[in-house]
Amino acid sequence: MGGYICVLLLEFGEISMEAFFPSRYSFTKPTRILFGMDEGAIKERVNETTKSVFNQAVKRLVIQGIVEEKDGKFRLAKKGKSLLQKIFSIKKTLNKKWDGKYRVVIFDIPEKKKKLRNWIRDELYDLNYKLLQKSVFIGRYPLTKEIIEKISEYKIDKNVNYLLVEKVFDEQIINSLKR
């Protein structure tokens, strides 16, 4: 539900809560269809339950700082825009045709920078990289431009190595990367 709300806010920029449900607006038709509402009279119980679920999702997004409310209208916050940009970038990378080469990322980030170590692990998992050994990951697709920029920005580029590999002999690893 949260993802759907974010995409709508990305498309429309700003929207009020009431705009998601009234049948008189054509742009609410996908929402009504998604929630199983017909175009005519909507049963009050279904309508209220749907609005309640929707309101809870919006409140969670506001609490998380992904969506912000101003004057009764909702819009994506800076954090929400950044999150969607990251998701679209990862999706774009994973939808590219694989070039037949594996990428190996090796990092040795000191304990005092543990948050950055966890960050890079999360980024690699998002790109479907698999753990080979502690702090050694392998994947089929290149790191996104944003990840490479942040590695430099966070000043950990001396702690991260990125290898391009043509052949991996461990069948188990190769099979795990195909998923």
Image: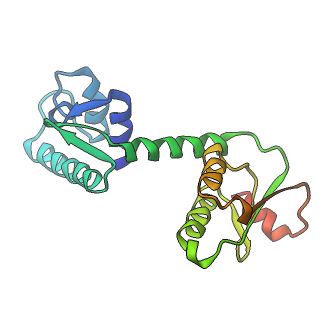
The quarter of the image holding the C terminus is bottom right
Q: Is residue 105 left or right of residue 8?
A: right
* Figure label count: 0
Considering depth in this image, is 121 or 36 the residue closer to the camera?
A: 121
Give the image quarter of residue 132: bottom right
Give the image quarter of residue 37: top left
Q: Is residue 173 left or right of residue 47?
A: right
Question: Measuring 56% from the left and 63% from the top, which residue is drawn there?
Answer: 119
Considering depth in this image, is 50 or 150 the residue closer to the camera?
A: 150
Considering depth in this image, is 58 or 47 the residue closer to the camera?
A: 58
Residue 71 point in image, percent of width and height: 13, 35
What kind of colouring is applied to the model shown? Answer: rainbow
Residue 168 point in image, percent of width and height: 88, 63
Residue 51 point in image, percent of width and height: 16, 45
Question: Measuring 73% from the left and 49% from the top, which residue is drawn there?
Answer: 141
Give the image quarter of residue 159: bottom right
Residue 99 point in image, percent of width and height: 82, 43
Question: Measuring 15% from the left and 34% from the top, which residue is drawn there?
Answer: 18
Q: Is residue 78 left or right of residue 103?
A: left
In the image, residue 125 above or below residue 135: above
In the image, residue 3 above or below residue 15: below
Name of the residue lying farthest toward the left: 44
